[in-house]
Image (cartoon, helix red, strand yellow):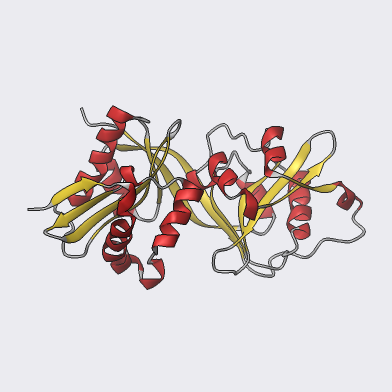
Amino acid sequence: MAGYRFCRSDDIPLLVAAHNACWVPHFGAESAITVDDFKRGIREIGLWSSSCMVAFEGDEPIGVLIAAKRDREANYVHRLAVRPGWERQGHGRHLLTSLVDKSAILGPPRVVAEVPADWTAICGFFEKSGFVEARRYGDFVRDAGGAAGMDAHDPRADLVVSLSLDELLESGALDVPSGRAWGRAKASLRARAGALAVLAVATDRIEAHLATASSRDGQGLEVLAIGAEPGPQGAALLGLLLARAGEAGAALRIPAIADDETCFDTLWALGFRRAREVIGYVGTRAS
């Protein structure tokens, strides 16, 4: 009979082993993680051992849930997988609903997840487990060489300034009515502040902004904050910032961005394409 348990801070090696036993067979060797990767996740997205669970058959892990937590926000389902050969036996459902039940009692009561819309079976699993769609995001990419560099004689170039993340946050430019995806949330940005390059077009206000970090694989830039007013003028200012970022010809990736953070029409005008749609789910406790 399978057993389940929530983890402790000293269970990180167990969680890493369970992840690699259960997740990697589905997503390939490149998706394996190390203890150092998990610890970086603690710093950057708030991975929280006591919100994580492992399912066992004897001493062997057959399922894993890796979750993050922010006390004033929610628990976030980062990874959930069942080992091949153990699917469709209720293990994933038990892990997920256990986290929802624990959160309802101990808080924060919200449990959220972000699932690619083309993972239709996984979306159905979350919905059958009591999760409801709250919003949609887009993963956008622009291939290397997708835009020309900045014109050195562009008169607006003098308006581009470097900011600290704190200055950008204080300006209100990162406030989004629908909320930001977990990895783009203000807390996630603060955790990565030392790795972010922040640029803005500043007059009497922040007219456009951009925060980037080098991609994990060293190929191009990850765009973690981008915004301007909709329309051609906003697109032009963002194009200026992307060029000034120093890697205008490099590949760019914008993960899980909401339409009210930056209008998707603006991103298309900048040469981005939507690679994937992502559904933001919120869990509800079963009655």
**Which of 55/122 is in front?**
55
- From this viewpoint, is residue 52 visible? yes
Q: Is residue 178 shown above or below 149? A: above
Report x, y in % for residue 234: 75, 45
- In this view of the protein, can residue 229 be seen by the observer? no
Name the spot of residue 27 as percent of width and height, x first: 35, 66
* Residue under the point 92% across and 51% down: 155
Query: Toward which corner of the image does residue 51 lie, by quadrant?
Result: top left
Q: Residue at x 44, y 60 (%)?
A: 37
Is 132 placed above or below 22 here? above
Q: Quadrant of residue 168?
A: top right
Marks counted in the figure total: 0
Q: Residue furthest front?
A: 10
Q: What's the residue at 26%, 62% (across, down)?
A: 22
Task: Tell which of 152 and 58 is nearer to you.
Answer: 58
Q: Residue furthest left?
A: 1
From the viewer's side, name the closer residue of 139 and 194. Answer: 194
Q: Residue furthest bottom?
A: 29
| Residue 87 x/y as whole percent | 18, 58
Q: On the rendered image, what quadrant is the C terminus found in? A: top left
Q: Residue at x 58, y 50 (%)?
A: 192
Is 74 positioned to the left or the right of 151 in the image? left
**Picture coordinates of residue 3, whole percent (x, y):** 13, 50
In the visual, does 242 lie left or right of 94?
A: right
Residue 7 lies, with reference to residue 152, above or below; the image says above
